[in-house]
Amino acid sequence: MKRLVFLVMTCLLVISSLVFAETKGKKEKLPPMSKETEACIGCHKLYSPGIVEDWMKSLHSKTTPSIALKKPELKRHPIKVSRRKTGNS
C-alpha cells in the first residue's frame, strides 16, 4: 500500500512539474509601452517590486486603453459583466 501511495505521489509530482515548466516558458507579448510608462515601471520596481510583478501578470499590462476600446463592449471586461444601466440604477 505504501508503494502505491509513493508511486501515485511521484507521478503527480512529475506531471505537475511538467505542466508548470510548459506554462512558465510561455511569455505573452506585451503591447509597446510609452517612455513615460517605462519610467514609471522603472521607479516602481525599486520601491514596490511586488506590485509591479503583479501588474505585469495582470490583464492591465497586456493591453492599452486604445486597444481595449476597439473590442466589443462585452469583451472589454474579463468577467463579461454588462455595464449598461438597469431600470433601478
Image (spheres, grey):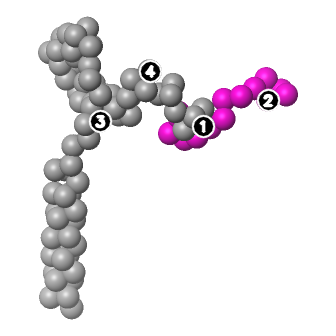
Bin the neighbour count of mark 1 within 10 Å (Cα to Cα): few under 14, some 14-19, many 20 and up: few
Location of residue 27 in the rendering, given as x and y in whole percent from the top left corner: 21, 43
Q: Which residue is mark 3?
A: 57
Task: First in sequence, mark 3 or 4: give its number.
Answer: 3
* Residue 44 visible at all: no
Location of residue 25 in the rendering, given as x and y in whole percent from the top left corner: 16, 50
CA separation, marks 3 and 4?
20 Å
Bin the neighbour count of mark 3 within 10 Å (Cα to Cα): few under 14, some 14-19, many 20 and up: few
Tell me the element at label 4. helix
Task: First in sequence, mark 3 or 1: give its number.
Answer: 3
Q: Do residues under tags 3 and 4 come within 8 Å of each other at their CB atoms?
A: no
Q: Which residue is mark 2?
A: 86
Three-letter residue code for mark 1 = Leu
Tell me the element at label 3. helix
Q: Nearer the viewer, mark 4 or mark 1?
A: 4
Residue at the far right in the pictured view: 87
Q: Do residues under tags 4 and 1 come within 8 Å of each other at their CB atoms?
A: no
Task: First in sequence, mark 4 or 1: give its number.
Answer: 4
Magenta portion: prevailing SS class: loop
- The residue closer to the viewer here, 88 or 76, is 76
CA separation, marks 3 and 1?
22 Å
Write the residue at 66% across / 29% down. Answer: 83
Tell me, yes or no, whether the highlighted magenta stretch contains residue 26: no
Q: Which residue is mark 4?
A: 66
* Residue 50 visible at all: yes
Tell me the element at label 2. loop
Above or below, 23 relative to 84: below
Tell me the element at label 1. helix
Boundaries of the magenta span:
76-89
